[in-house]
Image (cartoon, rainbow, N blue to C red):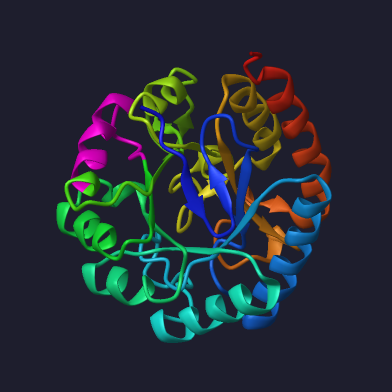
Amino acid sequence: MAHLVDIGSFKAGQGQRPFLIAGPCVIESEQLAMDTAGRIAEIAKSIGMPYVFKSSFDKANRTSITSFRGPGLEKGLAVLAKVKEQIGVPVLTDVHTEAQATEAGTVVDVLQIPAFLCRQTDLLIAAAKTGKVVNVKKGQFLSPAEMGHAVKKVEECGNRRIVLTERGSSFGYNNLVVDMRSFPILRSFGYPVVFDATHSVQLPGGGGTKSSGQREFVEPLACAAAGAGVDGFFMEVHPNPDEALSDGPNMVPLHQLKTLLERVVRICDAAAPRN
């Protein structure tokens, strides 16, 4: 059975307009978050694409101990609350502990479970118990079929507001590949499926003391996923990725976003089932 999931004022799922999750990887400043969220919201509205702002208050999974992690829980949630109120869009952030899930659940619309933590039962349960939408990213080390266990953990808490995100699979060292078979397999669990187009072109640890990336492949992979029939797209976006404090090499430059999304939406429309 296919579930439609309410996110803010729109529904996500099969047969619905594809939606966008986008924003800077990490909250670098309140001004950057507000400016970027506002511009992306304008772009999404212009092409009729529902939009969820994404940014992290803490990037716990960094290559180096000296890497920038973000403003922390309290300050980060304050920024996300301001984006939600003033820009008027749902907001998403990732959480790493049960306590973070509980606290963030009082502010955000969507709690994201990072790929490396998708098997952490207590974290999934804590997120599920908030009643908020839970976006579980598929681990780079898991087959798509194994994500059924994560789904079951959330469902057992009485929460059926679930989204599943594909972000690529480990392929040797410092590389990821995307298996397009993943999308129909993930969709078979009955929930909306999202393609993370920017983390899928990441080269984990490929920059020595940080991860690298190949943002030139975001568009072809996003187009392929659109043809495969996903329900939404996750893209980390920054006005100047080369100066970003996290994930710069794989983020989409803000000025290129509209053209990319217009192409992706056209493919989604062409690939949509006909009654």
In depth, the one of 136 and 269 nearer the eye is 269
Picture layout, residue 170 above or below residue 11: above
Residue 201, by quadrant, is: top right
| Magenta span includes 218 | no
In depth, the one of 76 and 201 nearer the eye is 76
Q: Position of residue 70 (x, y in %)?
A: 48, 75
For this view, does 43 lie left or right of residue 25?
Answer: right
Q: Position of residue 59 (x, y in %)?
A: 42, 66
Magenta segment's dominant SS is helix
Q: Position of residue 67 (x, y in %)?
A: 46, 69
Picture layout, residue 168 above or below residue 25: above
Residue 145, by quadrant, is: top left
For this view, does 45 lie left or right of residue 18?
Answer: right
Q: Position of residue 196 (x, y in %)?
A: 53, 41
The stretch in magenta equals 138-153
For this view, does 159 lie left or right of residue 201?
Answer: left
Q: How many marks?
A: 0
Residue at image point 74% right, 73% down: 35
Q: Looking at the rendering, in which quadrant would you find the C terminus?
A: top right
Picture layout, residue 214 above or below residue 224: below
Picture layout, residue 7 above or below residue 273: below
In depth, the one of 226 and 247 nearer the eye is 226
In depth, the one of 5 and 176 nearer the eye is 5
Q: Looking at the rendering, in which quadrant would you find the N terminus?
A: top left
Residue at image point 41% right, 36% down: 3
For this view, does 17 lie left or right of residue 117?
Answer: right
Q: Residue furthest top?
A: 275
| Magenta span includes 140 | yes
